[in-house]
Image: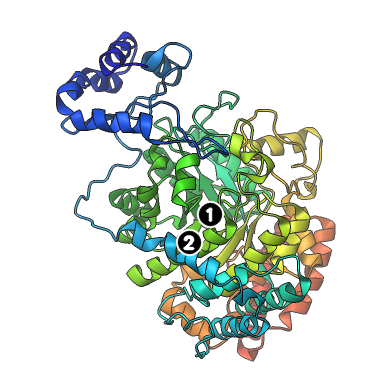
Amino acid sequence: MCSLPNALSNLAKVSQGLDASMLHCLQTLPRVVQLSRTAAAEGFALRKGLKTDGSRSCEPPRSLLLRSVQAGVAVRSARFGCRGGGVGGWLKNSMYVRHARWSVELEKNHTYRPTDEIIREHEISTALEETKMLAKDAECVRNILTKARENALLVKSQPATTNAPVAQTTSSEYVQGLSVRDAAVLLNLDENDASVMQPLFHTALAIKERIYGNRIVLFAPLYLASYCVNQCTYCAFRASNKSQTRGVLTREQLIAEVEALQQQGHRRLLLVAGESPKYSFEQVLDAIKTTAAVKTAPCGSIRRINVEIPALSVSDFKRLKATDCVGTYTLFQETYHRDTFKCVHPFGPKANYDHRLLTMDRAQRGGVDDVGIGALFGLADYRFEVLAMLQHAQHLEDEYNAGPHTISIPRIQPAVGAPDSAHGGPTPVSDAQFAKLVAVLRCAVPYTGMILSTRESPEMRRKLLQLGVSQMSAGSRTDLGAYEKMRQQLQREQVEQRENGDACKAESKDMLAQFTLQDHRGVDEVVRELLEDGFVPSWCTACYRKGRTGAAFMAIAKRGDIHNYCHPNGLLTLKEYLEDYAGHDTKRIGEEVMKREEQTITSHRARNAYERKLNRVGSGERDLYF
């Protein structure tokens, strides 16, 4: 094993050829010897402290953590034993020298609630154990489902047999329809017993139809870079994955990707990037502004940009907010179970559970109050993850009066070079369990958007749309530069852009995908099948742009008046798609659906206003909304 002096000697051997900032970092390292007995002790604990659990190893690679408070230097997680010899060889291979976090905190005065008070593991475990028998009590289950429905309708309900309902306000879009204990009862239902699952599914669908109607919001992820310094054992982008080809989109490539997505009909994008000095936060900010500025014929534009990027400081959240281009900031805890979190994040900045959990607190304090949370199902007990997400969401609501805008429900899929991605992850979630947890979430957080990705098959996605999902990706790719490659492929094959349903069916040969997709349909095929299944595909962004959020949104919801706003706005965006991007069959079916759906606009005044705007869209105007 390398000693600290030997490590420093190895570092010195690779100093030649480094840029100025890296050389300065190395020159400050000798001071660490005098400054950090604490760091040496911490490094020893890191090498010794983690043990195997008997079934799978939780022990990370042998690590050295060097800190210098005076110089602000941190060389983290240098892996010993790799080819090239110790720290020097590892640095020569990966060039991972960092003297700051990806996002540096400039505001040091913030204090936060202890994370063990936010995610209360004992409370979750107790609730799951104590409600096993209650899950077999038909009357208890009926009472909980009744309460969920009443809370979704914002009707004052009486305490159920398990405990009192969560206090509600209408000043925020977040409403927790079920307590942790009530949700635990539903999660303990036998997912293979149709007689108990059908009432749950019917309740979830009724709640979804009341709030969202039959609208499904569509978006696409856009990967900016595939570099990452973290070592997530379930992700193909993990730092030690030698089979992964790395890349970064140039500005020109980014513009080409956005243009390709616009020409598929997309209006909403999720920009994604890993954590690495090879792709900085400043580059993300530039990418956001570049994306917002791209326009294509006939009327292509991105109207909402969401981001899924590494954890930020309060000061950097303020910079993100200042772009005035970002809708939702999304970050998954991945797993809320601490011990599992340690096992699947052996090193890297992401290995800090508390720092990651408090990211949404920092977002709120930085002015970004539209946030999305999520867990990656398959890492730990799915029941634990659902209840922990409810605790996290309720904390944000209690602390900032702003619960999460969305909850994402990804399930592990295979990824090249990621050992914990095989066979559904360390704790696989069956299709029946997955359907149950989606229905429980819809009952528990009725006004929170629920996002489903192309990790799931078309058949599973169709089922989950009936249980609570309100947003889904379409025509997605998780490999770098894939959308422009798809467009070029279509041109080579002389296939019209609007008939691109089969264009996504072959995975990229560049091995840049973060995980395996299960739904390879193109956008037009997804839209057509949604229409055939009775849904209204929507790209609407009106509520955000008109300030119809928080208390204003809840006032509309309480009156049951959402359909006179969201529904006609969704139809107007569908009309745009049918005019500009749809294939022949999709356009024919879409026009039939629009005629049917117009009849559901109950207000005579709203119907007249909608018809006027619809005529204007038909005449070539775009981006009209209420």
In the picture, the disc for residue 388 is: 2
In the picture, the quarter occupied by the C terminus is: bottom right
State the image coordinates of residue 258 (x, y, percent, origin top left): 58, 44
Q: Nearer the viewer, residue 61 or 147?
A: 61
- Dot 2 and dot 1 residues touching (CB under 8 Å): yes
Question: In the picture shown, does residue 436 fall above or below 443?
Answer: above
Q: How is the image coloured?
A: rainbow
State whether residue 44 is above or below residue 429: above
Classify residue 372 as left or right of residue 37. Answer: right
Q: Quadrant of residue 433?
A: bottom right
Q: Amino acid at mark 2?
A: Ala
**Residue labelled with disc 1:** 375
Residue 68, horizontal then vertical, whole percent: 20, 30
Q: Is residue 59 above or below residue 502?
A: above
The quadrant of the image that shows the N terminus is top left
Residue 582 in sight = no
Q: Residues within 10 Å of mark 1 (few under 14, many from 20)?
A: many
Give the image location of residue 476, x and y in percent: 66, 47
Three-letter amino acid code at the position of disc 1: Ala
